[in-house]
Image (cartoon, coloured by chain):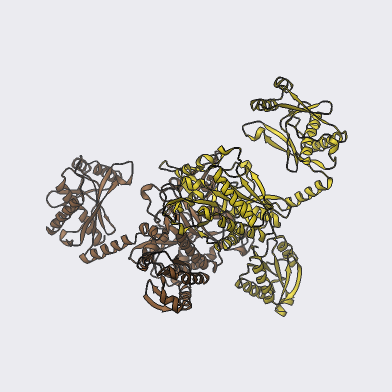
Chain colours: A yellow, B brown
Amino acid sequence: MEELTRIRHSLAHLLAMAVLEYDSKAKLALGPAIENGFYYDIEFSEGRNPSPPDLKAFEKNMKKLVLEKLSFECREISPEEARKKFADNPYKMELIDGIIERGEKITVYKTGDDFTDLCRGGHVESTGEINPDAFALTHIAGAYWRGDEKNAMLTRIYGLAFETPSALAEYRKMQEEAKKRDHKILGPELDLFTFSPLVGAGLPLWTPKGTTLRMLLDDCVWNLRKEYGYERVEIPHITKKDLYEKSGHWDKFKDELFRITTREGHEFAMKPMNCPHHCQIYARKPWSYRDLPQRYANTTMCYRDEQSGELAGLMRARSFTQDDAHVFCREAEVKDEVRAIYNIVTEFYGMFGIALEVRLSIWDKEHPEKYLGGEESWRKSVDTLEKLLYELGRKDFEWGIGEAAFYGPKIDFMGKDSLGRKHQIATIQLDMNMPERFDLACTNEEGERERIVMIHAAVMGSIERFLSILIEHTGGAFPFSLAPVQTAVLTVSEKHNEYAKGVWSELKKCGIRAELWNENESLGKKIRNVKLQKVPYFLVIGDKEVESQTVTVESRDEGALGAGALADFIHRTTNLTKSQTS
Amino acid sequence: MEELTRIRHSLAHLLAMAVLEYDSKAKLALGPAIENGFYYDIEFSEGRNPSPPDLKAFEKNMKKLVLEKLSFECREISPEEARKKFADNPYKMELIDGIIERGEKITVYKTGDDFTDLCRGGHVESTGEINPDAFALTHIAGAYWRGDEKNAMLTRIYGLAFETPSALAEYRKMQEEAKKRDHKILGPELDLFTFSPLVGAGLPLWTPKGTTLRMLLDDCVWNLRKEYGYERVEIPHITKKDLYEKSGHWDKFKDELFRITTREGHEFAMKPMNCPHHCQIYARKPWSYRDLPQRYANTTMCYRDEQSGELAGLMRARSFTQDDAHVFCREAEVKDEVRAIYNIVTEFYGMFGIALEVRLSIWDKEHPEKYLGGEESWRKSVDTLEKLLYELGRKDFEWGIGEAAFYGPKIDFMGKDSLGRKHQIATIQLDMNMPERFDLACTNEEGERERIVMIHAAVMGSIERFLSILIEHTGGAFPFSLAPVQTAVLTVSEKHNEYAKGVWSELKKCGIRAELWNENESLGKKIRNVKLQKVPYFLVIGDKEVESQTVTVESRDEGALGAGALADFIHRTTNLTKSQTS
């Protein structure tokens, strides 16, 4: 276990000690280390639920405990002793039952003189290893016991913890920046999308600006794809239950499926993914090996019945748009097809300066029963992908043992945004299962029927989710080629309207997405607003510009660029578009 | 009543007479005149259901009756007499109950010596007016009594009838041509779309070729729209029930709504139209009159829970794609906005040689209670549209009294296809209701809140429905600019592959949608197939062409064009694309 994880887990125990000092009857539930820190779920005595000032007091107490250089002593205890010791804590009793059921040892950890917690371990030897200025309690939230809304609601106290105070400070700074860039706030401020209480939570409505952005992103992916022979298809967003029974999704997705009973009593569902529909397009006619690969691309909405509490802006919505694609090919063609998708993915994310880490997710040999196909078939397909990654110069890939889908290995991409946060983004997935279930084949050179392979090849995955990342990655300052409004034309007063209108229409004629800001407002106010809107360029039109038939240019990224001919500005931006999209 | 309708209705009675001669216990239900002919719904005695040869016999009998110059004598009878007379016919009894309930007179029509039918009239004076060679019985179908599947299934016998034998012959020829062009057969043959029994009836899946066609059509409309300042928006395909309760669609569409209950127990629906969603986008912020009109375009799927029996290929599907648009504007802006939509509509249909008739659908003054808004408001809006149609040189428009929507008048377009069939296509609809229900407004010059008007402005209406018309209108021979495959390159034998590949890739580089047909098949077979696929051009590549570095061109519409340089062919088609899309 990593040192940092041990520190975080130990701090969870110190938090518990501080809490018990404040409310000796509080019932501790679970207190694990998590990314960036730790938490503890606790049932407080009635009327003793803590408030933010209490958190400050807990934190102070924890610092005191840290300085005492307390040790964590492990001791195995018998089921009887455990049940006696934790008899008045139903959460720990439930955990103990679980441990006994699984036939594991029961261990407790003692810290200081009085505090003992049921715990499987992973602690520092002494709290002396913890820097008292490198952790902090941050906030309180409600959490159902074991995440199940049928259980009691507990109080969760969150803390951050790092090895050094500067690491903590850096993380907090990043968090603050992230808060400023929160796409849920920034998106509506930039007028990209909106939610309506009548339409419902998790169902974003896209404004003209947001739609422009979506379409430009989709075009980016399509322009890359069409070079590799992809073709577009289109599908209905519903299907009879039969399709998902055959594909296996009816059982797998059952809770998340939006289900429909028609007036004639048939069962339908809204699609939570597109592969079964695309399989039906492939299955429409017999194929010769000469016709393969068939590569179907389709930007289309999918739907999942997410619980209200799980929704998070565009990051997790009930309707989201996949830039989906599926390749139907022979086994021997897999390598070339995956290489093409790899190239598309890296080129696309490269445009936005999002660096990618690669993981090769394979099966877990120890549990062959969890996977479709035998050792030979897994060895072969993993081998293909591994060799390809070497060929692509990606020896730095990680192995994800047991991270494969049950039907085949995959290449997962993790993207790092400008705030240093990692996001699981694209994934290239081999699928031997769907072709089997839908009996997809081609006729080979020998005139025999040959089972084919399917490859899942979404690039953004979900346009909504990608946009939530992109908005926060750029803080809304989109590159020129993507900006919904690329240039704003600002008038100083009404008498400059006519000339400004000419400039504006010339810009539009040259394919630049331009807006005319000729409201009867002060130039200062217009400039403030245009900056808030993160428009890449604005052109000021006043007496001087009208007289000299010029425009005064200011760039979002480079500041004031001075006055010049409109043609020069147009030339500049045309070059910019070329360099940002190639 | 038109003479032709009287002839058709009278023939329905003669059919009944012929039927009774064949099965004297048959129970007559309903026998109206319809477009192009007539039918009669009949319950035959057990085991007496007629077969096609029987139809021939009925027809022969009907001709005999025609020649007898029989008259139709009308007589009013009392409810008692009616009930006594038709006592053993439950269908007629039900009709009689209805007539009595509505307080109408009961009339019967006597033809010849023995036959009397309950009938409200509309007959020829004598069958002498009927041309015995201008009608025919065509086929038998099942039909539920009064169209309700809960009722008994009756036998419906269909007939055609015209004034002259040549009109009948012409209609039958047109029908035969229509059968050959049936989009339900031609569409899959041209590999445009497919249906899957696993996905379900009424849910078309779009192949690469069909998707290309859809996107080209959508681009056509978009290119016209963007000149008029439209912007694109995007919306989720579901909504909480609340949206439709507020818009009034929950009640109005209740049977046709696909409804969903989420896992949390909320009621959702799939959208059967887009206006309420678009209203929510408009409602996201306050608007100044300076910002108006807002014009939102959105190509997106809608869903209606159609009954299985009502489905008809792409003409009536459960999922269909609207090329929808809504304009939010002030009353004073209505005229200009409607003019713009009129221009878009006529330009679009003009591209395909579909002539348009115009109807101005207005309210029915006699029933103001059926409509929203008073006489003054209707007079004003109808006036605006009437003046506009005059300005547009469309004095030939029809008045559709009582054909308006309850919330506003509309301009309906009827299109005539190459077989002379009329289709209700685009419609421009003023809507004062949605803005009222959703409280949509702007701030006017006086700083006051002003209610706005919404205009519905779909051009194709449904891409699927339009495609069903276009496929039959063109017989699958799409204009060059729309053809999913514009040019096929056909090799004579394998040794011409290399040169042919060069030709093919040059075509693609020039933006021509080209296919390489280099299978190991005879040229004759390839030419037969390429003609069946209605590809606008094919280029033959053999020894001669390789040697002289030329291509031999054949055009679908103009026949053999001889050998020439590839560059000339490309030049020719580029000009074609320009002329067909501008």
Where is residue A161 shown, x and y percent of the image?
A: 79, 42
Q: How many labels does the image show?
A: 0
Seen in the picture, residue B313 relative to B255 is either above or below; the reply is below
Q: Which of A30 and A565 is in front in this view?
A: A30
Seen in the picture, residue A546 relative to B475 is either above or below; the reply is below
| Residue A519 located left or right of residue B343 | right
Where is residue B114 shown, x and y percent of the image?
A: 13, 48
| Residue A471 located left or right of residue A375 | right
Q: Nearer the viewer, residue A473 or A191?
A: A473
Q: Which of A518 and A366 is in front in this view?
A: A366
Q: Nearer the viewer, residue B33 or A117?
A: A117
| Residue A442 located left or right of residue A379 | left
**Residue positioned 70% across, 60% down in the render:** A477
Where is residue B286 shown, x and y percent of the image?
A: 63, 57
Seen in the picture, residue B117 relative to A8 is either above or below; the reply is below
Q: In which quarter of the image is the C terminus of chain A?
A: bottom right
Residue B415 position by quadrant: bottom left
Q: Quadrant of the N terminus of chain A?
A: top right
Instruction: Say if residue A253 shows up in the picture.
Output: no
Instruction: Say if residue A412 shows up in the picture.
Output: yes
Where is residue B62 shown, x and y percent of the image?
A: 16, 55
